Amino acid sequence: MCECSDCFSLQFLLQRGTLGETQNDCKRNMLYPYKFKPILVERIWGGDALARYGKDIPTGKLIGESWEISDRPDAQSIVANGPDTGQTLRQLIQQHGAQLIGTNCRSDRFPLLIKLLDARDRLSLQVHPPAAIATQLGGEPKTEMWYILHAAPDAKLIAGLRHGVTRRQFEEAIQQGGPAFQECFHQFPVHAGDALFVPSGRLHAIGAGLVIAEIQQNSDTTYRVYDWDRMDATGQPRALHIRQSLASIDFNDFEPAPTKLPIRCEHFTVEQLEIASKATGRCDGKNFQILGGITGDVTITTGNFTEQLRPGEFILLPAALGDYHLTASASAKILRASI
């Protein structure tokens, strides 16, 4: 009988009947590309367009958001593939730490929130608070970016103020409402493939007829300035946050244009990759990466693990994953995000 240490360990595990448990533990400690179950959120302005992106939309429900990767206390993403199926993102972070989120991550909370948005109707005119005043207002700062996956022929975005509009004029226009108010903000048409950077403090709204991939700071603070005189399900106007909005809006932000990728800021980097047939990438331990499908199907391979990425899906690549390979059956486009 062999008496080397490896064989002795194997014999010991066989005698105890724990070899299977050890193998399962090894699988659970393995890092691989993670898919998560979408968290579907009803919104008054939502619809059913996310069904075209593989989301299981309940009949008769207005689904405005699909939270694809979320580490919020009230909205935890759950792993949908591989050995860690059923684990929450929070549990993955507690188990793997920097191997998952990277040495560049300054917190043990996942720093980004990834969503798909279906704007069947237009969203409220709103703003997210800058870091300098967010805590004072009782919220969290939020900078985000949008990538247009689908746009109806007349779809528009609102971003920033029209040139020359002052804070005083804006406040007076809020009181008047109607056409006078709508002359204050900057509106422009958009098409599939366009992107927009939305820093905290930027007045903004998503118009009707858009499906958008949103990559943002891990925050859920929004202040509504105006809601187009819309009523909620009970027939009441939705709450506005005028004081907080006026404190948050950057009144020197005039008529921003759509943003070309890549987008780089202190909170994230987002780029678009076009894959004709094959491509490679690497996670070097410093940062996780998130891949999001735009067009075409992509196969992700790392070691012995393979996963599919389809339009409207997102996959989290752990920081310590190492090399990975991307294969497209036809030309494909994907987003790649990191911090």
Image (cartoon, grey):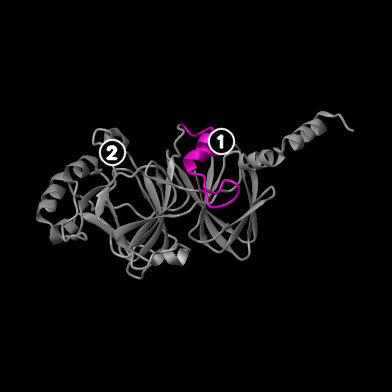
Looking at the image, the residue that sits furthest to the bottom is 153
Tell me how many marks there are.
2
Which amino acid does the dot numbered 1 rest on?
Answer: His
Estimate the x, y position of residue 331 in percent, counting from the top left. Answer: 59, 64
Q: Regarding mark 2 in the picture, which secondary structure is present there?
A: loop
The N terminus - image quarter = top right
User: Which residue is painted at 23% across and 50% down in the image?
Assistant: 224
Rounded to the nearest angstrom, the CA distance separating label 2 from label 1 is 29 Å
Q: Which of marks 2 and 1 is nearer the N terminus?
A: 1
Query: Between residues 169 and 203, which one lies in front from this camera angle?
Result: 203
Estimate the x, y position of residue 272 in percent, counting from the top left. Answer: 51, 54
The residue identified by callout 2 is 139
Q: Is residue 124 magenta?
A: no
Residue 93, relative to residue 151: is it above or below? above
**Image-based side of 233 in relation to 149, left or right:** left
Circles 2 and 1: CB atoms closer than 8 Å: no
The residue identified by callout 1 is 96
Q: Around disc 2, counting alpha carbons within 10 Å, would you say few (fewer than 14), some (14 to 19), or many (20 or more)? A: some
Q: Does the magenta stretch include residue 85?
A: yes
Query: Between residues 64 and 75, which one lies in front from this camera angle?
Result: 75
What numbered label is drawn on residue 52? none
**Image-based side of 320 in relation to 267, left or right:** right
Estimate the x, y position of residue 6 in percent, counting from the top left. Answer: 80, 32
Residue 7 appears in view: yes
Query: Between residues 121 and 80, which one lies in front from this camera angle?
Result: 80
Q: Regarding mark 1 in the picture, which secondary structure is present there?
A: helix
Estimate the x, y position of residue 182 in percent, counting from the top left. Answer: 19, 58
Magenta highlight range: 79-106
**Image-based side of 8 in relation to 148, left or right:** right
